[in-house]
Image (spheres, helix red, strand yellow):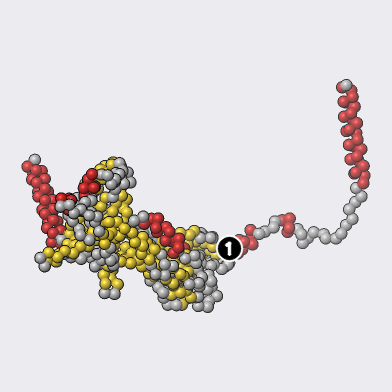
Amino acid sequence: MQRVALEIMMKKIFFLLTGILAGFFAKAQNVQIALGPDEIGQNQAWTITVTVNNDRLKSYENFPEIVGFQKRGTSSSSQTNITNGQISSSQSIIMTYVPTKQGIITVPSFKLKVNDQYYTVPGKKVKVGPPVQMQQSDPFRSFFDRDPMTDFFGRNQPTEFVDVKEDALLMLTTNKEEVYVGEGFTTTLSFLVAENNRALLQFHDIGRQLSDILKKMKPGNCWEENFNIENIEGEPIKIGNKNYMQYKIYQATFFPLNSQPVTFPSVGLEMIKFKVARNPSFFGQNRKEDFKTFYSKPKTVRVKELPPHPLRDAVAVGNYKLDERLNQTDLKTGQSISYEFNVYGEGNISAIAKPTLGNTPAFDFYEPNVRQNINREGGRVTGTKNFSYFMIPKEPGSYNLGNYFQWVFFNPKTKKYDTLKSQQTVRVMGESFKNQSIGSNDSGSFYDRINSADNTLKSFPDSRWIKWAIHIFSGLIVSATLFFLLKKR
């Protein structure tokens, strides 16, 4: 019992020291992580706020998925104060959640990575009640919307709000300026906020806006592979000599279907932008919600035809390799075997067609089973297309499968056509199926007598007496039938 108690005490000490050390490192890094309130209405937002003091917020990740909450998106803010000649600054990133139901929602403990350092955040329970009606007649709201100090001195006047110039933009970028027909290029629509931005901006109604944007933006002459961005989270990037926080709204790889240029028009994204009070006070309303629409610049990607080739209109475009699998190389005639021809690499995986196989008396090839796997990650579309064949060898001998399984594609990096060929060689043993085929087509003994049959023309004997005999027999039957019918009556 003493040993168990000692172990429990040691564990408590360990966790206590861990918490103290975590707090120490958090202070050393000047990182604060604050959770939202314990109770909200169903129509109110709940937040997790990460604040970095006197340092730059370089990176962050792992905002948790919470059952009962849905991520709405992130917003950021920064602040600089000068007090007695001392400059202090802070940067914050705010992940907003909205409740999906009423009741008690458990926020589990989680780890958040900020500036390459992990921080453990204890969980809590949040009570979500009925929707809260925010009315101007609310006495608490009206109290905080005015400055009691100015009321006391009789100088209460409407607060004047001013617009703070933002350093942000909506940008549509492509990773290539010119492509071949069928060659993919990745398009990204991002909202960029500069590191020294002082205006407070926030996303709103992003789902509806994005739906309208894509209706205008998606080109009709391309195959699209959408990266399906579900959570808009910031990522630090550097453009020129300037640092930005990038919020990717939409990303997809497009594969042109013809040589027409791919044109992206200018699109607009409406953001919430807060105006600030010219003379902020402790009790007064110091900011006012407003809206501003940011517009991207139009973009055009040039498309050029593939070089001349007999299969130019049928080949896939990309950087591909071959992975083949054959369960055995020593075969017997009539024995069914499986062979996999796997094309993998970067490109439009959906457009990869099966290899074209010629007719051969040495094998029977059956239609392949097709399976594909597509990965959309890191601005690239990669994957595998698997063709699984069944084949039956019919003639003995040694065969190079590269003579049968070939797949031609165009590599835009080398600007050349290339061919993937099987490197497998099989050895077939056993009797030829040619004689068996002839035997199976044997017409039988009836046709064997054709050559010995007499083929001279002969007249058919007179058969009129047979017809008269049939008529007389039929008349006798009818007469007998009538006789028996009349006798019964």
Amino acid identity at mark 1: Phe
Q: Residues within 10 Å of mark 1 (few under 14, many from 20)?
A: some
Q: Residue at x 7, y 42 (%)?
A: 2
Closer to the camera in the image, 170 or 49: 170
> Is residue 334 left or right of 384 when viewed as pictured?
right
> Is residue 336 left or right of 201 when viewed as pictured?
right
| Label 1 element class | helix
Name the residue that disc number 1 marks: 433
Q: For the view shown, which residue lies furthest in the top direction?
A: 489
Residue 347: percent from left, percent from top: 43, 68
Let me know if residue 159 appears in the view.
Answer: yes
> Is residue 159 left or right of 389 when viewed as pictured?
left
Q: For the view shown, which residue lies furthest in the left direction?
A: 2
Q: Quadrant of residue 218?
A: bottom left
Q: Is residue 465 above or below residue 308?
A: above
Q: For the view shown, which residue lies furthest in the front direction?
A: 154
Q: Quadrant of residue 489?
A: top right
